[in-house]
Image (tube, rainbow, N blue to C red):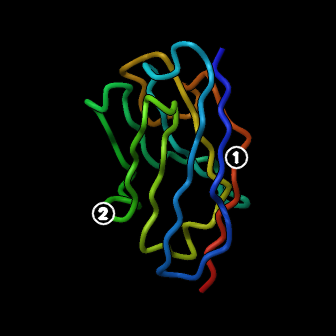
């Protein structure tokens, strides 16, 4: 079992930055692919970014490329999402997800473990 706890959300003005954190617990969490998804009101949950356990693989949604950076510190069992140049359309609940499959992709149903989410609100 892997437990995920997100933090770092909040209210920020457009153009600002936030860094989200996701702390993972569980003996093999450092080897899991970790990802961020988000869900805006009235919309389906969408993929944001992923990173593999050894950092050999990462991927981003087109909407966040060049603005968001995913990273991880395996010693701390924590994955981060640095969000720069935030836009009002980035407003959503952001979820951390994890899966043991190295080839897991951008579809939320592929992930076995989820955090409770953290709210990010970007004002215009």
Whether residue 60 is situated above or below residue 64 in the rendered picture: above
Residue at 53% of width from left, 81% of height from top? 14
x and y, in percent, of residue 60 in the image = 36, 48
User: In which image quadrant can residue 8 be found?
Assistant: bottom right
Badge 2, how many Cα within 10 Å: few under 14, some, many 20+? few
Give the structural element (helix, strand or loop) at label 1.
loop
Residue 66 numbered tag: 2
Residue placed furthest toward the left: 56
The residue sitting at 55% across, 45% down in the picture is: 37
Counting from the top left corner in percent of width and height, residue 42 is at 72, 59
Name the residue tied to disc 1.
117
- Tell me the element at label 2: loop
Q: Is residue 74 left or right of residue 122?
A: left
- Which sits earlier in the primary sequence, circle 1 or circle 2? 2
Q: Badge 1: few (under 14), some or many (20 or more) residues near its Cα, within 10 Å?
A: many
Specify the label residue 67 is tagged with: none
Q: Residue at x 51, y 75 (%)?
A: 87
Q: Quadrant of the N terminus?
A: top right
In the displayed orientation, state which residue is furthest to the front: 75
* Relative vertical location of residue 20 with respect to residue 57 in this rendering, above or below: below
- The quadrant the C terminus occupies is bottom right
Residue at position x 45%, y 36% from top?
106
In the foreground, 56 or 25? 25
Q: Is residue 117 left or right of residue 57?
A: right
State the residue in front, 116 or 88: 116
């Amino acid at each position: 079992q892997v437990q995920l706890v997100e933090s770092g959300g909040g209210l920020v003005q457009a153009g600002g930055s936030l860094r989200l954190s996701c702390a993972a617990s569980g003996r093999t969490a450092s080897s899991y692919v970790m990802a961020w998804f988000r869900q805006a009101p009235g919309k389906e949950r969408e993929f944001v970014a992923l990173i593999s356990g050894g950092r050999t693989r990462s991927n981003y949604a087109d909407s966040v490329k060049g603005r968001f950076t995913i990273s991880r510190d395996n010693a701390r069992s924590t994955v981060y999402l640095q969000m720069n140049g935030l836009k009002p359309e980035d407003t959503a609940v952001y979820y951390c997800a994890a899966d043991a499959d190295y080839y897991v992709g951008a579809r939320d149903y592929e992930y076995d473990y989820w955090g409770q989410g953290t709210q990010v609100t970007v004002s215009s």
